Amino acid sequence: MLDITNMTVEAARKVARGCEYCHGEGLATIFHRLYDGAPYVSRPAADGTPRRWVTRTTAYCVCEAGRVIAMNHQKHSPDAFAKMKDLAEIVDDLANGREQPWSPDDPTDTHDPTASWSKLRAQMVRTPPVQAVKPTATEQHMKKRDDDEQPLW
Ligand SMILES: [Zn+2]
């Protein structure tokens, strides 16, 4: 098994280039069970006020690129990490019959999704344990520069 502990995002993306879920970018598209082709649904919030909910978004992919990006966020951007969904957890829930509204499968598609979950599980790259560290001044500077250039990272 490939050790991704100190892999850069660029190196991981090269390794993951053939990934069918993210095409090596590290982020896979996921769909909520209410997805009907539009990226949002309107449903009242718990207090009754009207709200728009995202029904199609991205999650850390199960491949090397997704794992390295997840590790980097976990270390340096815990807020981003907390907001982002993880395809590995979603597929694990689905494959084990646990309640999970999200799926890598488009519910407007009519094929049987179960096969793709098992395939996904077989492809999962395990993330080594990560300790959150305070970013150094250089890393903070680089993060700011990255943020300016790319909205997501
Ligand atoms: Zn991937």
Image (cartoon, helix red, strand yellow):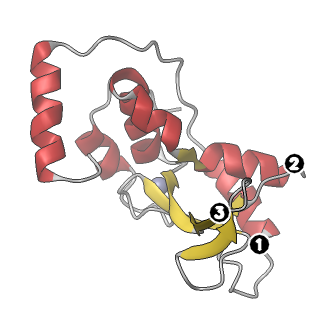
Residue on which disc 2 sits: 98
Lateral position of residue 86 relative to residue 22, left or right? right
- Residue 88 image point, x, y percent: 63, 45
Q: Earlier in the sequence, mark 2 or mark 3?
A: 3
Q: Quadrant of the C terminus?
A: top left
Q: Would you say 107 lies left or right of 41 here?
A: right
**Is residue 144 positioned above or below 85 on the image?**
above
Q: Report if residue 97 is visible in the image.
A: yes
At label 2, the amino acid type is Arg
Disc 1: CA contacts within 10 A as few (<14), some (14-19) or many (>=20): some
Q: CA distance from mark 1 to mark 3?
A: 34 Å
Query: Where is residue 63 shown, x and y percent of the image?
Result: 49, 48
Image-based side of 149 in relation to 32, left or right: left
In percent of the image, x 41 and y 62: which residue is there?
18
Disc 1 marks a residue whose amino acid type is Pro
**What x and y, as percent, mark residue 121?**
70, 50
- Picture quadrant where residue 103 is located: bottom right
Q: Of discs 2 and 3, which sits in the foreground?
A: 3
Name the residue nearer the viewer: 133 or 129. 133
Compute the Cα span from label 2 to label 1.
15 Å
Nearest to the eye among marks 2 and 1: give it.
2
**Residue bearing the label numbered 3:** 49
Residue at the disc numbered 1: 113
